[in-house]
Image (tube, rainbow, N blue to C red):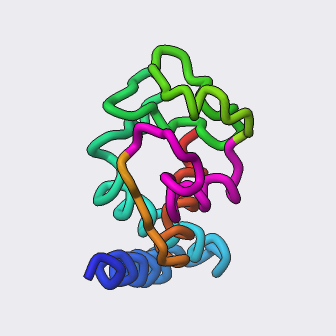
Amino acid sequence: MMKALISGLATLVFSISISTTAHASDDDLYKEAMVAAGYAAFQHRCIACHSMESSKNSFGPSLHGVLGRKAGSLPRYSYSEAMKKAGFIWDDNYLRDWIADNESFLPGTRMRHVAISDITEQDYLLAFIKTLR
């Protein structure tokens, strides 16, 4: 159901973009639609625990600027020991693995199980998270 809703939103945004943006390339319109669908997925799956603002943590850490950030390093957030010791830098692959199954990816984390196994929904979320800079 959620996949259909997000996919429908991406199609709607893409259609609106085509009709209102005469000079934008197809690639730009596709990216806009991906980000819009990712925003919808973020609102449904992530916003209850994660902020999009750089200076605001919530139950989980802010996801503003997460790409390129060392895991477990955001100031003013109390990470699990597993996350503090993870030692990697968040990139597309690490985020995708986390989104797919955070508990298997990093045992000992405090975050509840996510398990977004749908590759398309992962793509949407990643497209949106990349805008949080």
Residue farthest to the top, as pictured: 76
- How far from the left and from the top, in percent, is residue 68? 71, 39
Please state which of residues 131 and 48 is positioned toward the viewer in this rendering.
48
Q: Residue at x 70, y 49 (%)?
A: 91
Q: Tell me the quarter of the picture where residue 115 sits.
A: bottom left
Looking at the image, which is closer to me, 53 or 97? 97
Is 78 situated above or below 11?
above
Q: Quadrant of residue 71?
A: top right
Judge from the rendering whether residue 133 lies leftward or rightward of residue 40; answer left or right.
right
Quarter of the C terminus within the rendering = top right
Where, by quadrant of the figure, is residue 41 drawn?
Answer: bottom left
In the image, residue 95 above or below residue 66: below
- Viewer-side residue, 23 vs 7: 7
Q: Residue at x 60, y 61 (%)?
A: 96
131 is higher (above) or lower (below) than 99: above
| Position of residue 95 in the picture relative to residue 45 (left or right) | right
Residue 82 drawn at (x, y percent) = 57, 33
Task: Report the magenta residues as a range.
Answer: 90-111
For the point 32% across and 84% down, which residue is it? 4
